[in-house]
Image: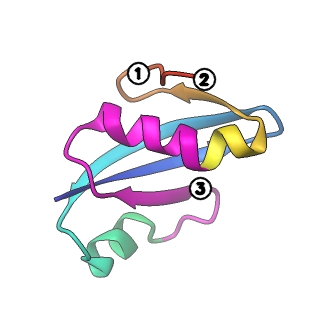
């Protein structure tokens, strides 16, 4: 299983709004979660825990863009360095 995070972003913040467990490589499941949505971004991470996925979205998307991560799902705060 992978953890799919769905988020929105503005000029300063990446806000995680949803977290779903999806079968590895199941693009149809991912597409279903994005049906009729054009206001969000997402990525499936090959990790089992939500907190690990939040850390990855910080490292791979937020930090390079200078964004702060806010986790509205579980309140996890990524380790910053």
> Are dots 2 and 1 in contact, CB under 8 Å?
no
Ranked by sequence position, the earlier of labels 1 and 3 is 3
Residue 14 spot, x, y in % from top left: 64, 37
Ranked by sequence position, the earlier of labels 3 and 2 is 3
Ranked by sequence position, the earlier of labels 2 and 1 is 1
Q: Marks 3 and 2, how far apart in space? A: 26 Å
The residue indicated by pointer 2 is 81
Residue 39 spot, x, y in % from top left: 64, 57
Magenta segment? 36-60
Crowdedness near tag 1: few (<14), some (14–19) or many (≥20) residues, C-alpha within 10 Å = some
The tag on residue 40 is 3
Q: Secondary structure at mark 3?
A: loop
Q: Secondary structure at mark 1?
A: loop
Of 63 and 44, the residue lying toward us? 63
Magenta-drawn stretch contains 48: yes
Q: Is residue 59 above or below residue 42?
A: above
The residue indicated by pointer 1 is 76
Horizontal side of 71 relative to 3 (left or right) equals: right
Horizontal side of 29 relative to 15 (left or right) equals: left
Residue 64 spot, x, y in % from top left: 72, 45
For discs 3 and 2, the disc positioned in front in the rendered view: 2
Residue at (35, 23) in percent of width and height:
74
Q: Marks 1 and 3, how far apart in space? A: 19 Å
């Amino acid at each position: 299983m992978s953890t799919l995070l769905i988020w929105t972003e503005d000029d300063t913040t990446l806000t995680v709004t949803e977290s779903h467990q999806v079968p590895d490589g199941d693009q149809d499941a991912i597409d279903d979660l994005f049906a009729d949505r054009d206001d969000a971004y997402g990525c499936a991470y090959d990790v089992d825990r939500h907190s690990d996925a939040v850390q990855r979205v910080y490292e791979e998307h937020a930090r390079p863009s200078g964004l702060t991560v806010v986790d509205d799902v579980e309140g996890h705060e990524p380790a910053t360095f």
